[in-house]
Every structure is written in C-alpha cells, then in structure tokens.
Image: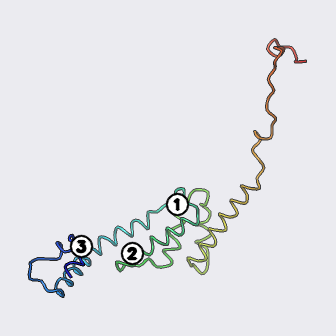
Amino acid sequence: MYGTVSDAVLNLAMTDDKRTASALWAAIGAVFRANKAPRAIFLNHEFHSMTQGDLSIDAYRVRMKEKADEPRDVGQPVYEPNLVLNPPRGLNEVYSNVADNIAGMQPLTFAAARTRSSSKSRARKTRKKCAPPPPSRLLPPLMAVTNGAAAAGRPAS
C-alpha cells in the first residue's frame, strides 16, 4: 500500500512507522474527510460567484452545471432550484431579461431554463444576422476633389 499512495498523502496520514494497511487507509480517509467543509465552502463560492464573461450562453450553462456538480463530491449537492436560479444572476447585460423569464417558469427545471436561455441566444444571433448594416456603410465614400475648385469655394466641374 505504501507504494500506491503519494508521499504527500502518506506524510499527512502516518504518525508512526508501525501502521497496518488498514490503519493507514483509515488515516487517509480521515485526512480527506477533514478537508470536506473548507472544500465545500470554496466550491459553493465558485458556483455562486460565476459570471458569463465572454462565454457563449451554452458554454456558460455547461460550465455552471459542472460547477454545480463539484460540491456533491464533498456532500453538499446543489439542488435543481438553485441550479436554475443562480445562472441568470451572472449573465451578461444583453441577456438580463432572461432572469425574469426563468423566474416565472413552471416547473422550474434546469432543462427548461437552458432551453429558454438558448432560445434567447439564438434569437439574438438571428437578429444580428438579419439587421441592416449601420448607416455609415450605406453612404458612398466621399470623392476627393482634384482640381482645387472646392478649396476655393467654387463648385467642382
């Protein structure tokens, strides 16, 4: 067993040289259980403080789901209502109305919230593609006056 445990974990768990494999295994378990509460605090903070940043809405939802799954490993699962209501808080400004839409949904499920926010993202992308170009792109470029007439205040010929 000594050869299968990293030196760092072995040093934390061993108190003397006369440990049996069973006692060593129990000591290693105690080391990891002692770390559960601080780890749960850290993981919950990461989940609740996550923002979209420059992620797409779909990538943000996937990342949020991954962050919600991590506390389960330390005995502090994120339940579905929290998984549904937390992500809208970190969305970019362009998706701010998604929070109102999601909060009013029944039933309140992660799958429904993901569908609602993805629909908003697709609609936004479609509007961007179909929007007319900005006015500056519609105007013809100004032509340079080569004969100096405009500089003298006379109309160009």
Residue nearest the viewer, comparing 42 with 54: 54
Residue hosting label 3: 6
In the displayed structure, 156 sits above or below 55; it is: above
Q: CA distance from mark 2 to mark 3?
A: 24 Å
Residue at 39% x, 66% y is: 45
Q: Is residue 28 left or right of residue 77?
A: left
Graded by Cα atoms within 10 Å as few (under 14), some (14 to 19) or many (20 or more), the crowding at tag 1 reads: many
Left or right of residue 152, residue 79 in this image: left
| Residue 6 lies in quadrant | bottom left
Q: Circle 3: is it few (<14), some (14-19), or many (20+) Cα within 10 Å?
A: few
Q: Are the residues at dot 1 and dot 2 in contact (C-beta closer than 8 Å)?
A: no
- Inspect the image, locate mark 2, and give the three-letter code of the amino acid beneath it: Pro
Compared across the picture, whether 92 is left or right of 25 comes to right
Which amino acid type is marked by label 1?
Gln
Q: Where in the figure is residue 38, as x and y percent of width and height?
A: 29, 70
Q: CA distance from mark 1 to mark 2?
A: 20 Å
In the image, farthest residue toward the bottom: 22
Which quarter of the rendered picture does the N terminus lie within?
bottom left
Q: Secondary structure at mark 2?
A: helix
Indicate the position of residue 28 as horizontal and vertical percent values: 22, 79
Identify the residue at image location x=21%, y=84%.
Answer: 25
Q: Is residue 157 above or below residue 59?
A: above
Task: Kindly report the distance in space between the C-alpha atoms of the residues bearing marks 1 and 3.
Answer: 37 Å
Q: Earlier in the sequence, mark 1 or mark 3?
A: 3
Q: Which residue is mark 2?
A: 71
Q: Which mark is residue 52?
A: 1
Q: Earlier in the sequence, mark 2 or mark 3?
A: 3
Q: Nearer the viewer, mark 2 or mark 3?
A: 3
Which numbered disc, 1 or 2, marks the residue that appears first in the sequence?
1
State the scheme by which the image is colored: rainbow
- Element type where label 3 sits in the image: loop
The residue at the point 49 percent across, 69 percent down is 64
